[in-house]
Amino acid sequence: MDKNENVCVCHRVSLGKIQSYIVREEPKVASQLSNCLDSGTSCGWCIPFLKKLHKLHSEGMEMDLNIDHEKYTERRDAYKQRKCTHEDADG
């Protein structure tokens, strides 16, 4: 996923914005990422991905989701229509 592509599609919060927020604010828990332009506060699809970014940063690793954005948004649409789960996101 490119830094300019949205992790939180509902609120149009890009990967780059989330990465910058994490580095700048050092949130103690992933739920504090909702303070970054309300990410994760609507449909809920991005919450596991926000948690992953938080965990990667906490472990000193590169904050990358390693998923194609087109596939990400397709699965998010299916999730909203209740045709897939979060577990289907990495496949």
Image (cartoon, rainbow, N blue to C red):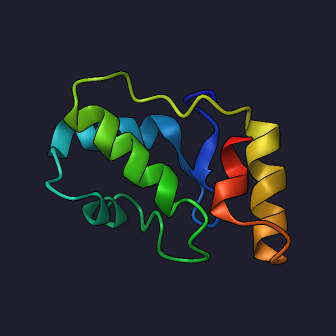
Identify the image quadrant of residue 9: bottom right
| Left or right relative to 89: residue 33 | left
Report the quarter where the N terminus lies. top right
Indicate the quadrant containing the C terminus: top left, top right, bottom left or bottom right.
Answer: top right
From the top left corner, tell me how far across and down residue 59 is, in percent: 22, 31
Picture coordinates of residue 88, whole percent (x, y): 73, 54
**Residue 42 location, x and y as percent?**
56, 77
Tell me what residue is drawn at x 25 percent, y 63 percent: 32
* In the image, residue 89 above or below residue 57: below
Q: Say which residue appears at 55% left-offset and 29% top-offset.
A: 3
Image position of 74 with respect to 16: above or below: below
91 or 9, nearer to the observer: 91
Residue in front for this viewpoint, 53 or 91: 91
Residue at 48% from the left image edge and 67% from the top image edge: 40
Direction from residue 88 to residue 35 in the image, left or right: left
Q: x and y percent of residue 48 in the render?
A: 49, 57
* Residue at 35% over, 66% down: 34
The quarter holding residue 43 reads: bottom right
* Number of callouts: 0
